[in-house]
Image: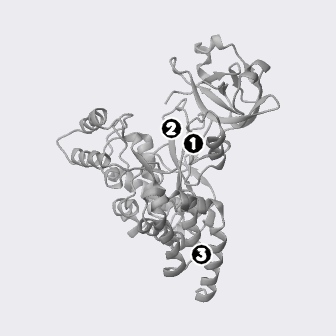
Amino acid sequence: MKINSLVLFGAVISLLCSCLQRSDLSMALNYADDNRAELEKTLSHYLFEDPNPEKFAAAQYLIENMPGHYSYQNSAIYSYYAYADSILADTSLTPEQQRDSLLDKTDRRFRAMPFLKKEDIEIIKADYLIDNIDKSYAQWTTCPWASHLSFEDYLEWLLPYKAAEYQELDAWRDTMLAHFGTCLEHPVKNDVEYNTTLGVAEMIRNEAYHGLNRYGLYTEAGLPLLTAHLQVSQTFGDIPDYALTAVLAFRAAGVPAVLDETPVGSRYTAATKWYVILSDRGEELTSEWDLATMIGGGFFPDERGPKVYRNTYAINRERLEYLRYSKYAHPFELGKKDVTSKYFLTSNLEIPIDMVSRILLKDRYVLIASAVRDDRNPWQIVDFGTMKRGKACFHDMGREVLYRVMGYDGKRLIHISDPFILHKDGSLEYISADTIYSQHLDKWKNNAL
């Protein structure tokens, strides 16, 4: 049903006036500095050229949450990608030789690449944003397997122009769909799977898995190949590489998908990052890890861990506040949402901290670390909390894990609690710090990343 154009225009103008008064949008526009005109061009496009309140709200969402998202912005990355392209095109090399060539190149010339970055809000172009909004919106409003999404679901599961930091601002939707979307042209029609989210996702997963010609999983392969034309031809990589490819392929086809991950190494499996789709039954269906595993088989039932985080485009406001006001700012990424309670039994913890330790603290924020199987660095920080009434408070901590609380004394992080096991029934068992390396405690530890 078409909406009267004058009514629609009036609604959009009203929306614009109210939005420009919102601090998040105005702050983001100011933060864009010289690139502000590109963001305003995007908003203007959905006011006058394509007046659509939902697309305008989508543009606003992307702009408001853009600070804190990064891309490489240096000619060196294009040099590296060009070299990677030549390596992957060299059929005389085995996948292992391709991997080793890229790793050698990284070690010799591109070690500093992770530091050569710019925030997307300073470099992104209006045409790129508009193209992503239009294509994702068309999928949401026309694909039967996306029609169950609310507008809020659409924003999180389908709209974002990237699914990982440092992902190239390229035409990944077109590239992924061209390589792994031919199955949509001639779908298998039956009463059970036809046009269901899971049915379409399985067709895409199957085509991508066989189309990639993957030869193996490797933990080291140089810099991640975060440009779409290399991702579809990569013959090696690790589970996070192929889980990311899955999410991009799904979203390119209109299948709502996100990446979930653990902040420490998995205890019993190789699962450190995996994908999730939102089915038309309202279920969040997980993979075991990457494209090689069927959807909906369930996350490993025996796995345990301290936290599970969802990679989101939306900024985690609690983390933003922590980074702004903590005196010791652990580098937590802003685009993470705590979804631990979807996977594990969890507990809210209130750990008493003795007076001597409290006197030493120079920050109201405290950190909680999970024990890992690494004698050199046995503790890995997984979350932050606050001091309240003499206790360190943390939310939704996974059970059957060995923890320790840390705080900042003005110079460094210090341990402010004895190690303790959070048991399956929610009880706490404190242990001596001298026994932390004992083998009988390994069952409470995760692997180091």
Q: Is residue 327 left or right of residue 116?
A: right
> Which x, y percent locates residue 152?
63, 63
Confirm whether residue 306 shows in the render. no
Q: Residue furthest top?
A: 434
The answer to whether mark 2 and mark 1 are in CB contact below 8 A is: yes
The span from disc 2 to disc 1 (Cα, nearest Å) is 9 Å
Separation (CA) of disc 3 from disc 1: 38 Å
Whole-percent x and y of residue 416? 70, 22
Residue hosting label 1? 299
Calculate the distance from the C-alpha at mark 2 to the C-alpha at mark 3: 40 Å
Mark 1 residue type = Phe
Of the residues shown, which amino acid type is indicated by label 2? Ala
* Crowdedness near tag 1: few (<14), some (14–19) or many (≥20) residues, C-alpha within 10 Å: some
- Residue 68 drawn above or below residue 42: above
Q: Is tag 3's residue or tag 1's residue first in the polypeptide sequence?
A: 3
Above or below residue 47? Residue 431 is: above
On the rendered image, what quadrant is the N terminus found in?
bottom right
Amino acid marked by disc 3: Pro
Q: Quadrant of residue 326?
A: top right
Residue shown at 51% from the left, 67% from the top: 195
133 left or right, relative to 298: left
2 vs 1, front mark: 2
Q: Which residue is mark 3?
A: 53
Query: Sequence order check: which comes first, mark 2 or mark 1?
Result: 2
Dot 3: element: helix
